[in-house]
Image (spheres, coloured by chain):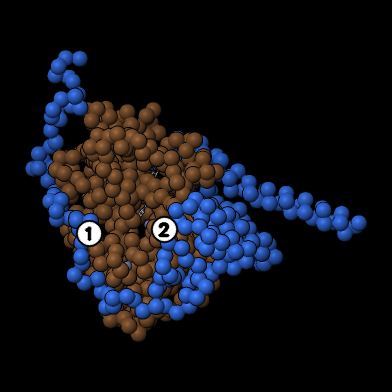
Amino acid sequence: MRAMVYRGPYQVRVEDKDVPAIEHPNDAIVRVTLAAICGSDLHLYHGLMPDTRVGHTFGHEFIGVVEQVGPSVQNLAVGDRVMVPFNVFCGSCWFCARGLYSNCHNVNPNATAVGGIYGYSHTTGGYDGGQSQYVRVPFADVGPTKIPEWMHDEDAVVLTDAAATGYFGAQLGEIAEGDTVVVLGAGPVGLIAAQSSWLMGAGRVIVVDHLEERLEKARTMAYAETLDYDELDDVVVELKKQTDYLGADVVIEAVGAEADGNFLQQVTGTKLKLQGGSPVALNWAIDGVRKGGTVSVVGAYGPIPNAVKFGDALNKGLTLRMNQTPVKRQWPRMFEHVRNGHLTPREVVTHRFPLEHIAEAYHVFSSKLDGCIKPLILPDAA
Amino acid sequence: MSESDIPSAYVRDKRTPPPSREELRARIPGWGVDLDPADRPSYPRLQYPADTGAHWDFPERQPGSEGREHSIEHAFVTPVFGTAQPLRGPSGAIRRYAYRRFSEGRLAHWLLLVVGDRVDAWEHHLQSFVSGRPDVPASGVRTESTHGGVRSRRGRSDVRHQLLDPVVVTGPWVAGAGVVVLGVRRLLRAVRG
Ligand SMILES: NC(=O)c1ccc[n+]([C@@H]2O[C@H](COP(=O)([O-])OP(=O)(O)OC[C@H]3O[C@@H](n4cnc5c(N)ncnc54)[C@H](O)[C@@H]3O)[C@@H](O)[C@H]2O)c1
Ligand SMILES: [Zn+2]
Ligand SMILES: [Zn+2]
């Protein structure tokens, strides 16, 4: 089969690999019909995630058709069309039993501080991912869901992570009616977080980024006000002015460890790798939220420490909420919202690349060329 | 500043109340459908799902865990695990040491894994030069011309640090080439006596 393969920082290509085999009685093998590149994949691509091995196949957003099932699988059959949450999870450990699917303890021997994720280095368990023609799906009775008849494939693939994470991020914000919500980052996650904030009763939604096409999308798809930080001397001061010197009631940080906006932090964090990425957006969130407010962090950070302004968070009495998204827990309600047109995941999709052009897809998405917001990967296209 | 201009933060109530429900509902599709905080899928944080699909208390163990690296904060290799890219070569030795010696709580654990990553990449780059498919310092750069590299970056602040990318990306390659040249020279000198 053909699969995306990591060769080292900034280097990916397509190679021939063996089709994965059933390794556990509850495994399934899924033939991928549509995949995507997530903002999180960029952290691997840039060499920021420890234990990313050469030869690894990335990809934790994918849908497909069940090709083969292990002997103990009861809920899926060959031929089912399935969407697969980005989390690998067992459904039965202490954490899964309490709904913390993204924190499963039974699937990632390499670390206890993070659960299992498809195609996301050995630090999340060493599973090859879905930017590929076939993928091994452990716990087939627990993770995958059959794609509803009415659902568009592009909605389904974005729901496997980016959209679920935006919706989850808004929930972590503990939004109350009338709140002013600031969303940092207008990538796929931030855009859906902005849409979701309204569903939870926000009175005002302000999206911050510096890429004009993404801010435009925030205005049209999420009815948000927007701020371009390239045009501002100091984002935090602008947020204070915009909120009558209170600060935002809620800030959702949908940027993560590669935040721009501070040259020194970018260079030390992501270029020289002297800290675990750049904490600029997280610090903007801490400074921009009001005292007693809530910061929701869904932007991803790795295990290496960051220069986070913890003292300000303490002195302001903030609530900090965060996690990797337990995707499947979001789905039943999100399916209703998508069906009713209240959430529109596939609106974030801008580019579609054949798997053979994976290197091009990564470069375009990583450098944000050509107005790219969300690139999909078509495994079968020539 | 007259009393009535004093910003909200300094008085009891927000000076500009949020728009009314009716106004928001008219403007935004679905406004307020998840209004009740107690009726959101992630509330409360700990929930006991009725049925996760799991039909076991502890999953059957996947064969082949002997010798597989694991965090020492785990009691054992988890019952299910990834089998992609098992440890091998010098990078494998570094990584194995990082796992065996240091917990996740120790910075040394992660820094050694990063060192392992760089060694791994160079093992493979060197092998690639004797294979039919040599690695290149950055893949996909041809999209700079096909997908508007210049046009897309106009006026963007991240261009300042992106200017460093060629150095960050090719720097190790230039340094690597230097080391190889020096090494070859030494070797030749040694061979010549
Ligand atoms: N918690 C989870 O489960 C989870 C799941 C998916 C993605 N993520 C993370 O969410 C983040 C966003 O993902 P995405 O796919 O939307 O990525 P993306 O790269 O498409 O979007 C990130 C956006 O942030 C903007 N940005 C950079 N610096 C900024 C700053 N200082 N302030 C405001 N905006 C800034 C960028 O211009 C870009 O538009 C990533 O860190 C990703 O790893 C987390
Ligand atoms: Zn992701
Ligand atoms: Zn579990």
Residue found at x 26% / y 43%: A319
Residue A26 sits in which quadrant? Answer: bottom left
Coordinates of residue B121 in the picture (x, y in percent): 59, 59
Label 1 element class: loop
Q: Nearer the viewer, residue B40 or B160?
A: B40
Q: Tag 1: residue type?
A: Leu
* Label 1 CA crowd tier, 10 Å (few <14, some 14–19, many 20+): few
Residue found at x 32% / y 53%: A323
Measure the alpha-carbon separation of dots 2 and 1. Answer: 30 Å
Q: Tag 2: residue type?
A: Ile
The residue lying furthest to the right in this view is B193
Residue A75 sits in which quadrant? Answer: bottom left
Residue found at x 53% / y 57%: B113
Same chain check for tags 2 and 1: no
Q: Nearer the viewer, residue A369 or B83?
A: B83
For chain A, the rendered hue is brown
Q: Which mark is residue A37?
A: 2
Residue annotated with mark 1? B46
Q: Nearer the viewer, residue A241 or A78?
A: A241
Coordinates of residue B58 in the picture (x, y in percent): 32, 75
